[in-house]
Image (spheres, rainbow, N blue to C red):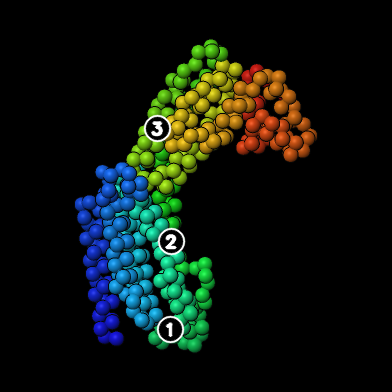
Amino acid sequence: PIVFERWIEIEKKFAIEKMDALLSSPTAWESQYKNIADIDTLKVPECGESFITLMSTITDRYKYLPSPEHRLKFLDMQLELLEDFRIRLVQVMKEVTHDSLGDTFCAILNGVHYITDVLREWCNTTFFVELQYHNATRPVEPSTGADEEDTKRPTKRAGAGFMADESVFDEGIDLFDKLKVEMEKNILKHATLDVQARSQPYRKYRWRNLEDSGDLSLSTPACDMLMVLRDHLMTMNRKLSKPLFVKMWRKLAEEMSKFMLEEVVLQNRFSEGGAKQLEFDMTRNLFPLYGEYTTKPQNYFRLINEACTLLCLRVGSALLLREVLMSEESRLEKEQALQDLGVYKLTPQRALNVLNSRTNLSVT
């Protein structure tokens, strides 16, 4: 027992010293494979990868201990180290939150994503499944001085009964996931607000006065807004791991689609020329910004794409559709009328509001 306790003490001391060194290294937030694009899709920072290596080597040293109780004590230490590392990441993250698309913030997010992925893989290994069984079935040890009632209460992890879908890392994964979600929201908010801040000229454009010239080009008020959006997409692609970037550009596309509908279409009136100009700006300029990341970018802009369909619908068809949407028909029949035109995402009321923003339809 004395040797065992000394072993654990040394392991923990070494691990903490190692974490100190990892996070203070000048290359802590750089990927070791940053110059090898083919294998650097995860863009894991050096400190994140080294921390997982540290945890793995600890496992390798204790995994052959014959006593489950001894292995569980090592596991407890690993869970403490995991939480310690997460807290350190949070501290660094808070220092750079103001720069949510900066190198350090993105590197932390990549590291958090990588660690949660590895932990989920470990959950399915035989070694940790067995530890979960032993952990769930070991007796609860009352703390010194605990009364009889205290000993009946379940501890945080031990003695709860084995559940096949649970893992020894569940709590750690949950905390890392919450951190990841918070960081993703920060990046999305930063990019969205920056693009929206450049959108005022576009939102206030003279849509109702534009004539149908037939010769279309990108409207001037859209240029600055779309350039900022393009720059943010390029920055995310360069700094975030591939799985994170895919998730972020899809969310950003969804936010842009919603913004264009609510702040441009529903806040303005559109002449026939204005409707065609908006459609051109969206389908020939906004959507293609995402063409590098997906073969069908229009699928991620359903709201504004469908709004453009309704704005550019021929007058006769638009009048008939509006009549259906304003009638006493059931919601199902109204939705069917919209679906016949390829409109699935807009609700009947939203679709009616879009039609009413056309200047060539008399509003009744």
Amino acid of disc 1: Glu
Assess whether mark 1 and mark 3 are in contact (beta carbons under 8 angstroms). Answer: no
Q: Residue furthest right?
A: 328
Q: Nearer the viewer, mark 2 or mark 3?
A: 2
Q: Nearer the viewer, residue 91 or 302?
A: 302
Q: Position of residue 134 (x, y in %)?
A: 45, 78
Q: Position of residue 99 (x, y in %)?
A: 33, 44
How crowded is the residue under tag 2: few (<14 C-alpha within 10 Å), some, or many (20+)? Answer: some
Q: Nearer the viewer, residue 121 or 188?
A: 121
Name the image quarter holding the N terminus. Answer: bottom left
Q: Which residue is mark 1?
A: 141
Residue at left offset 44%, top offset 56%: 178
Residue at left offset 60%, top offset 17%: 272
Q: State how far apart marks 2 and 3 are (Cα).
A: 34 Å
How crowded is the residue under tag 1: few (<14 C-alpha within 10 Å), some, or many (20+)? Answer: few
Q: Which residue is mark 3?
A: 230
Residue at left offset 26%, top offset 67%: 16
Q: State how far apart marks 3 and 1 are (Cα).
A: 58 Å
Q: Which residue is mark 2?
A: 120
